[in-house]
Amino acid sequence: MNQQTNRHGVLYLVATPLGNLDDMVPRAVKVLQSVALVAAEDTRRTGLLLDQLGINQQMLSVHDHNERDRIPLLLDKLGAGQSIALVSDAGTPAISDPGYRIVAEVVAAGFDISVIPGPCAAVVALAGGGLPTDRFTFIGFPPARSGQRRQLFSQYAHCRETLVIYESVHRIDESLADAVQVFGADRRAVVARELTKLHESWYRGSLTELLSMAREDANFHRGELVILIEGQRADEPADSLDLEKLCRVLADELPPGRAASAAARISGKRRKDCFELIMAFNPEHPEAD
Ligand code: SAM
């Protein structure tokens, strides 16, 4: 480990299991045993993990709301030659979890970073999803409000790469419904649920099929999940591109309701769909949501 050869401490980013303790890699255990401090997103949760591993360590809470404030203290410790392990509740720190600000500051201060790799839900879902993995785009958690979510999705509507999305089980139906609107009913997708855990399950199909499964299967709303959406295929008809362009142009010139009516007449699509697309570009508009 570099900390023996370093005057300064090392910041270790230590991945932890997504829900299966056997996924804890031996190097992560060694690091957690050897550092001066474990900086944890939730000290209670990490405390349980450390107990299961038989490790007794000093902990400090570092979460989204205090990450910036903790940086000076962490830099002082590294400067004093003490190594720190940063862990999140599950998976890889800094991936939709606290950490990147700390990493940036630690790098800027000239200290060493070392990542102890391990589980990451996005990568596990991609690996088993069966959608193309040569290129992918990770968009993390979409916004909770439908208008903003559709606006985000529409930025990727013509992306050729597989999209990887983290979503809460409480919003999965709404998110899939928005995805149907933006990416089209037939786009292939996967929902990977409870990865590495007892009830790991994979749901595959078109976006509309997945939406029906979500509405019918209560399990869809339990635990944690990742959504994968296949990128736009080269042979996919470009009509959704035209509709989006058409709606954008009309919405620049007309109030949303009139723009939607005009777009529906020109494209032959439903006015409601055109209206929702227009609102997705302009979620702050008083008619949105
Ligand atoms: N840093 C973590 C990682 O490396 O995957 C992600 C943390 S993020 C706050 C939590 C989200 O990751 C969940 O809402 C879910 O979308 C996804 N996730 C985490 N564990 C999962 C699991 N076991 N199965 C499916 N998705 C999971």
Image (spheres, rainbow, N blue to C red):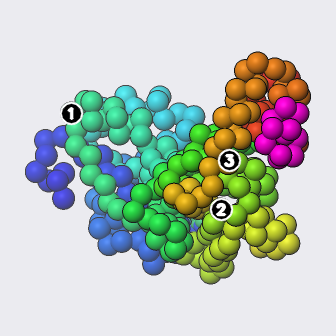
Q: Against 277, is 54 above or below?
A: below
Disc 1 target residue: 110
Q: Are the residues flagged by discs 1 and 3 in contact, CB closer than 8 Å?
A: no
Disc 2 target residue: 187
- The residue positioned 10% from the left and 51% from the top of the image is 5
Q: CA distance from mark 1 to mark 3?
A: 48 Å
- The residue positioned 36% from the left and 52% from the top of the image is 13
Q: Secondary structure at mark 2?
A: loop
- Residue 51 relative to residue 27: left or right: right
- First-in-chain label (1 vs 2): 1
Disc 3 target residue: 240
Of the 4 image quadrants, the one containing the C terminus is: top right
Give the residues drawn in magenta, as a range.
261-271
User: Which mark's residue is nearer the viewer, 1 or 2?
Assistant: 2
- The answer as to whether callout 1 falls within 8 Å of ligand 1 is no
User: Which mark's residue is nearer the viewer, 1 or 3?
Assistant: 3
Amino acid tagged 3: Ser
Q: Against 86, is 75 above or below?
A: above
Outermost residue toward the top in this view = 253
Q: Against 130, is 225 above or below?
A: above
- The residue positioned 74% from the left and 33% from the top of the image is 247
Q: Is residue 129 visible?
A: yes
Image quadrant of residue 195?
A: bottom right
- First-in-chain label (1 vs 3): 1
